[in-house]
Amino acid sequence: MMVHDLRGPISGVMGALELLGEAPGLDDGNRRLLDAAERNTRRQLKLVEGILELARLEEGPFPFGAKTCRSRASSTKCCRWRCRPRRRADWS
């Protein structure tokens, strides 16, 4: 899949940017450019990882595990939490 091929180079760019960030003598302008490059590279990596996760979900059955639970106790606890009186400071 093409997305797998994108993750490697993006991770390599992230590593190079981190090394550049540790270099002494960067002026403020270059530091801002480096920060912007790091921020945008992290965004790109998140995008690629999101596409990979979506592809995994579309591939087939998701491995759900059945588990027994006490639904009455859980719903009662949830209702108590949601219906508790709110303090005036919480109103906003």
Image (spheres, grey):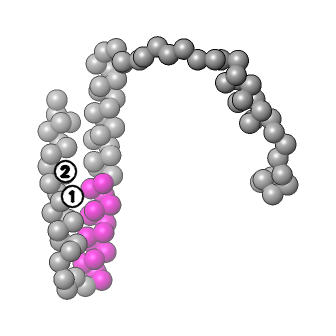
- Neighbour class for label 2 at 10 Å: few (<14), some, many (≥20)? some
Residue on which disc 2 sits: 10
Q: Are marks 1 and 2 in contact (CB under 8 Å)?
A: yes
Q: Percent x, y for residue 68?
A: 54, 14
- Residue 5 inside the magenta-drawn segment: no
The kind of residue on which mark 1 rests is Met
SS of the residue under disc 2 = helix
Position of 42 relative to 61 (above/below): below
According to the picture, the residue beneath numbered tag 1 turns out to be 14
- Magenta span: 28-42
Point 81% across, 57% down: residue: 89
Say left or right for 53 vs 90.
left
Quick check: 26 left or right of 76? Answer: left
- Where 4 sits versus 73, above or below? below
Residue plotted at (27% across, 56% down): 41
Residue 44 percent across, percent down from the top left: 29, 49
The quadrant of the image that shows the C terminus is bottom right
* Marking on residue 63: none
Name the amino acid, label 2: Ile
* Mark pair 1, 2: CA separation: 6 Å
Counting from the top left corner in percent of width and height, residue 13 is at: 17, 57
